Image (cartoon, rainbow, N blue to C red):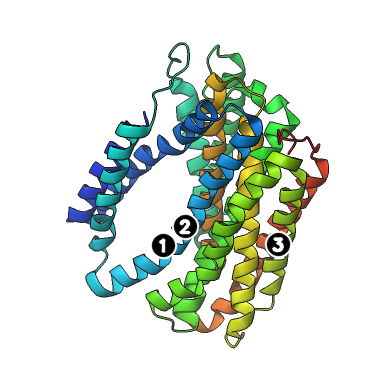
Amino acid sequence: MFQTGLAVFGAASLVCATADSVGALVAARAVQGVGASMLSPVALAIVVNAMPDPRERAQAIGIWASVFGLSMAAGPITGGVLVAELGWRSLFWAGLPVVAAALLLSVVFVPESRGPRARRLDVPGQVLLSTAIAVWVGVLIEGPRIGWTAPAALAAYGIGAVATAGLVRVESRRAEPLMDPGLFRSPAFSGAVLGAVAVFVALNVTLLLNTLYLQHARGFTPPAAGLATLPMAVGATVCAPWSGRLVGRRGARLPLTLAGGFLTGGGLCLVGLDRTTGLPLLLLAYSLIGIGFGFANAPITNTAVSGLPSARAGVAGAITSTARQVGSALGIALAGGLMANSTPAALAHASRPGWILVAACGLLLLVLAHAARTKHAGGHGA
C-alpha cells in the first residue's frame, strides 16, 4: 500500500507538472491527495510493527514527526525559490526525484506487514464522510462571500447535518466500518483525534495568514517569506524527537503541556498584529508556534496507536491522519474566510481573530494535557 501510494502520488505530480488547464491541474491535485492518503497511515503501521517496545516506538514516532518540521523548513524556502526563478510547474518536477528515491528505499528496506485478513471497502461510510467534510469546509470557505444566512448556506447546513448524522448511524451498524465507533469510546483516543485536529488547524491558520501578511501586507518576496518561517520549522524539527523521548519516559502529559503552552504563547504574540510589527516579534511568534507543533505530534500520534493490536495500527493511524487533514482543511477555510475581500492595508487587522484561534487551539491542548493520565513508557494517556 505504501508503494502504491508513492506511485499514485508521483504519477499525479507528473500530470500536475504538464497540466494545460486549471481543470486538469485541480483533478491531478485530487489524485495526489488520494496517493498521499495511503502514505501516513501505512507509515505509522510500519513504525508500530517495527518497534514493538512502547518506549522505542514513542521515540520513533517523535523522529517520524520531525519530518513535518523538515518539510516546513524545506517547503516554503525551496518552493519560494522555485516559483520565483522557474515558475510553478517546477514545484511538481522537483518532487519527482524525491518520490522515486522514496519508492526505491521502501522496496529495499521496508518490511511487508498486513492484517490477518483484508477489510471490506465501506462505500456508504466513505461517501458520507467525504460529503460531510466537503460540505462543512465548503460552507466555511464560501460563507463570507454568499452570507451565512443565505439560502445556499442554509441548504448546506442541512446537507452537512444529515451527512454527519447518517455517518454516525451507518458506521455504528456495520461489521467493518470505515471509522470504527468503538475506538472513540476510549477517552485517550478521542482526545488524540481532537488534539490532531486542533494542532493542524493552528498550523494551517498560521501558514496561510503568515504567507498573505508577509507577501501582500509587507511586500516580502516568496523566498524571503519562506526564510521568515525558518524559525517555525527549526523549532518543530528539533522538538519533535525530544517530544518522542519524553513520551517514552514520562507519558503524554508533559509534552502536551509544553505544546499547548508554546502554541498559546505564539498566537497571543500576534493578536495585535499590524503593518509595522517588528520582525523580532514575528520571528519569536513563529518560533513558539513551531516548538508547540514539534512537541504536539508525538504524544498525539503515540496515544492514538498505543494500546491497540498491531493489526489495528493502520486503522488508528488512518483516523488520526484524517483528523490532521480535516484540521488542515478547516484551518485553511477559516483563515481564508477571515482574509476574504481584505485589502493589503487591512490584512494585518483582519488576521487578528486567526491568531486568537491559534491561541485557543493551544489552550485546548492544555486541557487535553490536564486530562491525560501520565504513564511511564507507554504514552497511553492523552
Label 3 environment density (alpha carbons within 10 Å; few <14, some 14–19, many ≥20):
many
Give the x, y percent position of residue 173: 59, 14
- x%, y% of residue 136? 54, 45
Residue name at image x 31 percent, y 33 percent: 108
Residue under the image location 40 percent in, 34 percent down? 38
Residue 275, quarter of the rendered image: bottom right
Q: Looking at the picture, how far across and down is residue 382, in whole percent?
A: 73, 39
Of the residues under marks 1 and 3, which one precedes in the sequence? 1
**Cα separation between marks 1 and 2:** 6 Å
- Residue at the spot of label 1: 74
Going by the numbered disc 3, the residue's amino acid type is Phe
Mark in the foreground, 3 or 2: 2
Q: Work out which quarter of the rendered image holds the N terminus and state it.
A: top left
Amino acid of disc 1: Ala
Q: Which of 308 and 16 is in front in this view?
A: 308
N-terminal label among 3 and 2: 2
Q: What SS does tag 1 mark?
A: helix
Kindly identify which numbered label has been placed on residue 70: 2
Q: Residue furthest bottom?
A: 276
- Report how far apart the C-alphas of labels 3 and 2 lie in the structure: 19 Å
Cα distance between the residues tagged 1 and 3:
22 Å
Q: Please tell me which residue lies in front, 116 or 190.
A: 116
Whether residue 320 is situated above or below residue 176 in the rendered picture? below
Q: In this view, does 174 lie to the left or right of 259?
A: left
The answer to whether the residues at label 3 and label 2 have Cβ atoms under 8 Å apart is no
Q: Which amino acid does label 2 sit on?
A: Leu
- How crowded is the residue under tag 1: few (<14 C-alpha within 10 Å), some, or many (20+)? some
Contact? badges 1 and 2 (CB < 8 Å):
yes
- Compared with 313, 303 (above or below) is below
- Is residue 226 depicted above or below 54 in this figure? below
| Residue to which mark 3 is pinned | 262
